Image (tube, rainbow, N blue to C red):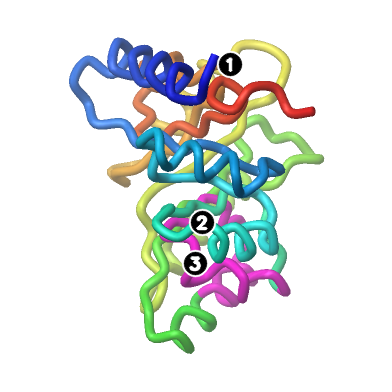
Amino acid sequence: MSFSDRLAEVRRRIDAAAHGRAITLVAVSKTQPASAVKEALAAGQEIFGENYAQELRDKAREVPGARWHFIGPLQRNKVKYVVGTAELIHSVDSMVLLQEIAERAAKLGIVQRCLIQVNVGGEPQKSGCSVDELPALRAAFAGAVTLEGLMCIPPAEGDPVPHFRKLRQIAAGLPQLSMGMSADYEAAIAEGATIVRVGTALFGARS
């Protein structure tokens, strides 16, 4: 099956779940070669998600015309590769990271759009601020960074729906909810997702 065929199927399923709501599809291209991204772009997919800062930097140079989101954990010393390249950063999870992003954006003379990643499952091994930390981090956005919404990655085991529902409930008026991946994006849309991050269902299993 070609990328075009897989894209058409994913879009069909998104439309069926969305009931007329606008959903942003982010094609997760981490570890995919630039040639695969170019094929996807030619098929009509515009927005791609990367997990690694230097891979984002390199692919952005190799694939002109693509739009980029950064969806992985972001280290402070890698912020310089992401700010100004990714139109949306999904993974802000601490005050120190927010400050680093704000300083870099101000230096570039831009406003960087961001989401806060929330560790809805309370998993110690996973990135994201806690639900209790969210209000203070949310209040810290100002100046060269703008907060558009929240992101989560539910626990790998069990039903993701309660975690999607929890993120929607704590979003408190923010317009964007980034939740749902290849295995559960339809359930995430049913719970209010506005952005879904789909990799395997589009590119196939990684080798």
Residue 116: % across, % down? 51, 52
**Three-letter code, disc 2:** Val
Q: Which residue is drawn at 73% across and 28% down?
A: 206
Q: Give the SS element for disc 3.
A: loop
Residue 2: % across, % down? 52, 20
Q: Nearer the viewer, mark 1 or mark 3?
A: 3
Left or right: 111, with 140 as reference point: left
Choose the circle earlier in sequence order: 3 or 2.
2
Choose the circle earlier in sequence order: 1 or 2.
2
- Which of the two residues, 196 or 162, is positioned nearer the viewer here? 196
Label 1 neighbour load within 10 Å: few <14, some 14-19, many 20+: few
Task: Measure the alpha-carbon separation of dots 1 and 2.
Answer: 27 Å
Q: Return the residue at label 2.
A: 63
- Which of the two residues, 179 or 170, is positioned nearer the viewer here? 179
Residue 6: % across, % down? 48, 18
Position of residue 75 relative to residue 104, above or below, is above
Label 3 neighbour load within 10 Å: few <14, some 14-19, many 20+: some
Disc number placed over residue 46 in the picture, else none: none
Position of residue 84 relative to residue 179, above or below, is below
Q: Do the residues labelled 3 and 2 touch (CB within 8 Å)?
A: no
- Which of the two residues, 152 or 89, is positioned nearer the viewer here? 89
**Three-letter code, disc 3:** Thr
Magenta region includes residue 114: no
Magenta region includes residue 90: yes
Task: Measure the alpha-carbon separation of dots 1 and 3.
Answer: 28 Å
Residue 147: % across, % down? 38, 59
Magenta region: 77-101
Disc number placed over residue 183 in the picture, else none: 1
**Three-letter code, disc 1:** Ala
Total marks drawn?
3
Q: Return the residue at label 3.
A: 85
